[in-house]
Structures are given as structure tokens and as C-alpha cells.
Amino acid sequence: MLQSAHNSEQLQVKNLATNNHIHVYRYENGISKQIGTGVVHESSVALTVNTETWLTFMCTPVQLEALAVGFLYNEGVISRRDEVADVRLCEHGDNVDVWLTHDAEQPKHWRRTSGCTGGVTAATEGRGMKGEGGRREAEGGGLRLAPEQVCRLSDMLLSSQQLYRETGGVHTSSLSDGDKIIITAEDIGRHNTLDKIAGLCLLQNIWPEQRILLTTGRISSEMLQKAARLGTAAVISRTAPSSLSIQMAESLGITLIGYARRDRFNVYAHEERLVKSDK
């Protein structure tokens, strides 16, 4: 049986928001005053696969089981939930052990990503795109987006930023079915948020028919590849995509939207999914 981490993760989030409290000096209008504030934790957490240590995540220490399983999923090491025999976070919180139902060879070369926390990947474009949540078709299952829907989803992403409101300094990503938020993950690393979402989808068997990825992070090629692995038809970011992610979105049939705000956004790939408002 897979170990449930719901209660421990809730406790970790609470600790991040309340126990890591410090005093700082705030300067405002030329006046200094001391205030209390929360600071997000940054931790190093090792990933062990079948008793072999693979790498170390620099991450926010919540949803760590999901991070480990989601990373293996997004890297193409696993494709289905039943390939995971067990996953456990050690009592000190600095190592996640994953046992698979099959042998897995650690990649010989990890490529450092453009992530702000020094993420790594061994995946390449096109490798491991199909899995339990893999893309069904380039048309994205017939998804259509109204402009006001894009702006509403962007606002919903901001409303889901629980840890960010407490501490700042983290990225937030959410998976939506186009109507509501299904899963949300927060982390100092934008890549980690997508691994956590993948892990939660896999461990909880949550795969909505329509999948729209929302994120506060910049869309690099690695972010776009993880989004494709999740089977998303559209990616909506609060900031910008890279040139390579735009090319990948075009070839993979993913609508790519950036700089999404309350009343505006840019469409970088597959604008044909945007439909006129009924209003």
C-alpha cells in the first residue's frame, strides 16, 4: 500500500507558515520599523529509488512523496501508478524512498535545467510523453477557451496561493479542468511544482478529461515538456515563455498563453482554441 501523507503534509505547511517566523526591518516612506514575517523553508531532500540514491532536490519540504513520484513520472522512469510499490518519507524529512515494481537504471548524465533552484533532468523532447496522464491528441480533446475564462483561471491561480500569502518567495502551479482548480502545488522551484502535480495525479488517480495547467512560473522548454507529459491542452502562465517552449508548444499542439492578468494575456501558440465570448 502507498503511504498516505495528507496529514503530515498539512502539518508541514502549517510549520512553514507559522514556525519559521523571523523579525525584519521594514523601510517605508523613509521610516524604519521592526515587523514579524514568515520565511519559506528551502531544504535539500534526497531521492532514493530501489535503495539507490539518485539525486538531491532543493525544494520546499511539502508534498515530498508527490514530488518524488512525479519527478520519476515526468522523467519517463514510470508511466503508471501500479509501477510504484511504495513511497516513504524518512522520519528526518531529508530523504524520500521510492520502491518500484521493476528495475530502474539511474541516468548517467543529468542536464541542469533553467530552474531558479538548480533543477535537473535527463529527459529530452519527445521522450516519455505517453503515460497514465499522457497527451491524447494534438487537438487537446476539443478544448475551447473564452478570453474571460483565461482571465478567470488566472485569478483562481492567485487565489490558490496559500503558502505564498504566508511567506512569499514561492511559485504556484495548479491543474484545472477549465472550470475549477483540481490540484495546487507550491514550491521555491517552478519545476518542482509540476513534478508535485504529476505525483498527486498519479498517487490519487486524478486525471480530469480536460487539463489546463496554470502557473506563476516562466515557461521554459522543461516546463512545457512536463506540461505535455501531464496531458495538458493549454498552459497559462503569469509570465513569459521561452523561444524553445513556443516551438515545442506549436509542434505538440498545446495552446501556450503568457502574461495572463485580470483583463489581458498573450497567446504564443495555437490561438485557434480561443473563441469569442458569448457576452
Image (tube, helix red, strand yellow):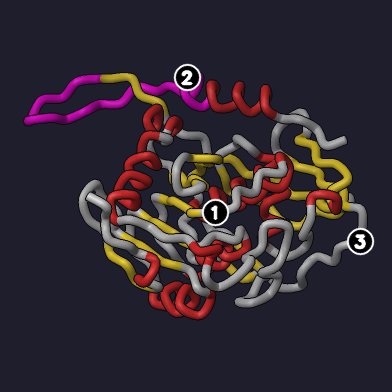
How far, Cα to Cα, is label 2 from label 3?
41 Å
Q: Which mark is residue 103?
A: 3
State whether residue 67 appears in this view: no
Q: Position of residue 251 (x, y in %)?
A: 51, 80
State which region is magenta: 16-34
Q: Look at the magenta stretch and give its main secondary structure.
A: strand
Residue that carries the numbered disc 1 in the rendered image:
210
Return the disc, 2 or 1, that comes first in the chain's sequence: 2
Return the disc, 3 or 1, that comes first in the chain's sequence: 3
Identify which amino acid the numbered label 3 is placed on.
Asp
Report helix, strand or loop for mark 2: helix
Q: Position of residue 221 (x, y in %)?
A: 50, 70
**Front of the two marks 2 and 1:** 1
Identify which amino acid the numbered label 1 is placed on.
Gln
Report helix, strand or loop for mark 3: loop
Left/right of residue 166 with respect to residue 55 in the rendered view: left
Q: Find residue 169 and report its image quarter.
A: top left
Residue that carries the numbered disc 2 in the rendered image:
18
How far, Cα to Cα, is label 3 from label 1?
33 Å
Q: Does 107 appear above or below 66? A: below
Residue drawn 81% across the image and 44% down it:
97
